[in-house]
Amino acid sequence: MADNCSSVEIVEGCRLPVLRKNQEHEDEWPLAEILSLKEVSGRKLFYVHYIDFNKRLDEWVTADRLDMKKLQFPKKEAKTPTKNGLSGSRPSSPEREVVSEKKDTNNDTALQKKQRKTLDLNIQSATAPSRGKTLPTPVQKRKEVVPLVTPVPPATPVPALPSSTETSQAAVFPVVREPPTFKAREDLEPLSSVTTNGTARRLIPPQPGRKRKANCGGSDEMIKVLQYNKPQSAAVFLPPPEDSQDSSDGIPTAPRMTGSLVSDRSHDDIITRMKNIECIELGRHRLKPWYFSPYPQELTTLPILYLCEFCLKYLKSLKCLQRHLTKCNLRHPPGNEIYRKGTISFFEIDGRKNKNYSQNLCLLAKCFLDHKTLYYDTDPFLFYVMTEYDSKGFHIVGYFSKEKESTEDYNVACILTLPPYQRRGYGKLLIEFSYELSKVEGKTGTPEKPLSDLGLLSYRSYWSQTILEILMDLKPDNGERPQITINEISEITSVKKEDVISTLQYLNLINYYKGQYILTLSEEIVDGHEKAMQKRHLRIDPKCLHFTPKDWSKRGKW
């Protein structure tokens, strides 16, 4: 295949299968796009992005890994938009689609001429007063378009979910039926409906073989919690769902014009789509970046970028780093230590008072976060850095940032666990700490969307474990099944109400039975939850938190 490469000139934007190893270390040939080319020591290298794969898998490959037999050239004058405003591949099309584009242009021109002629004939009647009658609209004959997706019949309307303000009582009866099974995320996608403001919310799937009353969606409707082989269960009142802010719905929202760190993917170019840092040395770890980060241009050509692990200053050589360490007096992040238990500590850092550290932290985080952008104006943000202590100092493990004033109840803007510490429970610890701060502030919070794929998995797991922990700890009251509302769950956990409802629906716990919504906890769910909690050793101790929230709205300047 390398011989064919010399005879055919490959340009940026071409698509072709590229050889790579999957998780099972087996060969596969996914379709990839050529983003850049370079020549090193007489060898041609191609920077490829695997279509429908995460950008962190992008890499430089040699010509012998390219399948030239299935090469697709891009159409001429192709721009570089992104799909749905999110990161991904440029929709550059093969040349064979140029012909159909010309046909479409000719059809549009003929349609415009026909429409102009129709308007000339009706110009007199259009200028006359209508006298309450609607003018006839000229019929335009358009070419028939073949739909790519099979039309889906409208879903059965679901009764309105009950209000959380009214709490009428109802008896709970045992239900004999098969345990609910978990559905894959793909199976839940058709249950999303788009609302007027562009967000989406999930509908509860209709249960087969069960009839619904026409007027059973009253305000006194409750959700029962049933638990197999358990003596206690609870009734949960479900309020009307507002527009879900769950990022798993896949509908992007426009970035806000405040201090938000959400990136606008509509201005991506070929530079920001490519990794520009080869390797980062941070303390005793060497990190391989996943995404682009706007470090100074002269540092991007270095084989290794050196960072001081305490002040995060970037340096170009090991000798410069050693000279810097003789002058750097920091052995922990700047700011106030607001939590310490064992070797784990949290430091609160003001983005205005410690601007250099905050900017360096954002540069490092951008190497591993693709859905967030970088603003050098860190004044509107607070940064909470988690560290691990040893004899040499406090080493950074991860962090999350939040706005000092959030009008949308966001308690996290960016959240990151550095790769050497991932899959060890630190991600859930960061999330749990963010909600502990919200509890002290007396607010409910939610992370800023969109979340990365790994961030969404961590939040889903945390929400599921936290809610199931509350439902399973409910005890009978005077021999009757306990009752709890969605609002009460939200107040106990500080998890926003919409996130509670979306998690219950994601777990497929909500069912409709005899005119009522019920939550059924099967043995499978209970056993899975207990096993997960046994593995979760790292927890936040509220007694070790020394935090006083500030009212930033009363301050003239952050």
Image (cartoon, helix red, strand yellow):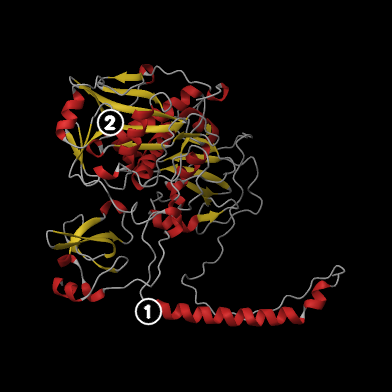
Residue ID for mark 2:
312
Instruction: Indicate the position of residue 82 as horizontal and vertical percent values.
Output: 42, 59
List x then y, in percent, for residue 237: 56, 37
Residue identified by numbered label 1: 96
Residue 49 spot, x, y in % from top left: 29, 59
> How far separated are the C-alphas under marks 1 and 2?
50 Å
The answer to whether residue 431 is left or right of residue 139 is: left
**Which residue is depicted at the point 52% across and 46% down?**
244
Which residue ends up furthest to the right in the rendered image?
131
From this viewpoint, is residue 449 visible? yes
For badge 1, the amino acid type reads: Arg
Q: Nearer the viewer, mark 1 or mark 2?
A: 2
Toward the viewer: 326 or 253?
326
- Between residues 166 and 440, which one lies in front from this camera angle? 440
Q: Residue furthest left?
A: 41
Element marked by disc 2: loop
Residue at 32% from the left image edge and 41% from the top image edge: 528
Q: With respect to residue 267, does 545 lie above or below?
A: above
Q: Name the quarter where the N terminus is drawn.
A: bottom left
In the picture provided, is 465 more to the left or to the right than 138?
A: left
Q: Position of residue 406 (x, y in %)?
A: 52, 33
1 or 2: tag closer to the N-terminus:
1
